[in-house]
């Protein structure tokens, strides 16, 4: 009788211990799953905030021009897209570049310095195998109403990153009265600076 009681007690102890371990294991698994879900949500939020950045630059009239407009830079998935609408220019072709200083204080826009050229290449048309400046956006067309649109996208720019060869923050957008010929050094002989906008966060 005593042997049977001891055996029953031993079996009951094993059963209770097994149930307790299983309960703790399930609880630990639930905690781990919850932690993983929270980490995934936080990582997704961080990734989302890193993937999209935007700066809108208002253009100031320079050199006695009637220019107005704005340019928006949007960084997403490793590329920066530039979209701009510019008014108050004569009909035809005009040049637009990124210059090295976010300083539009001079009446003629000269305070913005020369073309942004961190890689010390010759001036040229964007993508030219012979070389081009990171600020060599090029030309855009203005219609009979004095309005023009600028659009381009590149993975060679970034907004506020640590790579000074790519970071456009701290630079300026300059609109010229003339046409960039893509060959004259160091700036394409684009003529008077008629608009300026500082690229700042």
Image (spheres, rainbow, N blue to C red):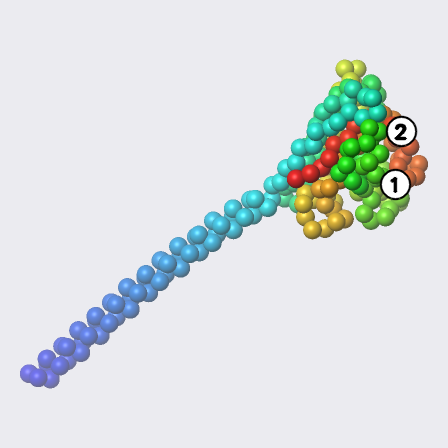
Foreground label between 2 and 1: 2
Horizontally, residue 189 falls left or right of residue 105, namely right
> Mark 2, residues whose alpha carbon is within 10 Å: few (<14), some, or many (≥20)?
some
Query: Which of marks 1 and 2 precedes in the sequence?
Result: 1
According to the image, label 2 marks what residue?
191
In the rendering, which numbered label is found on residue 123? 1
- Residue 79 visible in rendering: no
The percent coordinates of residue 182 (x first, y second) are: 89, 35
The percent coordinates of residue 153 (x first, y second) are: 72, 37
Q: Quadrant of residue 109?
A: top right
Which residue lies most toward the top here?
145
Q: Residue at x 80, y 41 (%)?
A: 100
Q: Residue at x 84, y 29 (%)?
A: 108
The percent coordinates of residue 47 (x first, y second) are: 56, 48
For the residue pair 87 and 59, the one nearer the viewer reads as 59
For the residue pair 122 and 7, the one nearer the viewer reads as 122
Q: Residue at x 47, y 54 (%)?
A: 39
- Residue 29 visible in rendering: yes
Name the element at disc 1: loop
The total number of labels drawn is 2
Q: Quadrant of the N terminus?
A: bottom left
Q: Quadrant of the C terminus?
A: top right
């Amino acid at each position: 009788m005593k042997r049977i009681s001891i055996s029953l007690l031993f079996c009951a102890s094993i059963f209770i211990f097994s149930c307790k371990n299983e309960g703790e294991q399930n609880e630990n698994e639930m905690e781990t799953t919850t932690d993983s879900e929270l980490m995934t949500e936080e990582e997704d939020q961080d990734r989302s905030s890193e993937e999209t950045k935007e700066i809108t630059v208002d253009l100031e009239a320079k050199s006695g021009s009637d220019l107005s407009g704005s340019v928006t830079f949007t960084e997403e998935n490793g590329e920066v897209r530039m979209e701009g609408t510019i008014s108050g220019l004569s009909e035809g072709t005009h040049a637009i570049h990124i210059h090295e200083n976010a300083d539009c204080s001079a009446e003629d826009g000269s305070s913005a310095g020369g073309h942004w050229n961190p890689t010390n290449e010759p001036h040229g048309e964007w993508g030219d195998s012979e070389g081009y400046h990171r600020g060599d956006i090029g030309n855009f067309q203005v219609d009979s109403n004095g309005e023009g649109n600028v659009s381009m996208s590149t993975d060679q720019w970034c907004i506020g990153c640590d790579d000074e060869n790519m970071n456009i923050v701290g630079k300026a957008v300059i609109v010229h009265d003339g046409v960039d010929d893509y060959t004259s050094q160091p700036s394409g002989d684009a003529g008077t600076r008629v608009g300026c906008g500082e690229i700042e966060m």
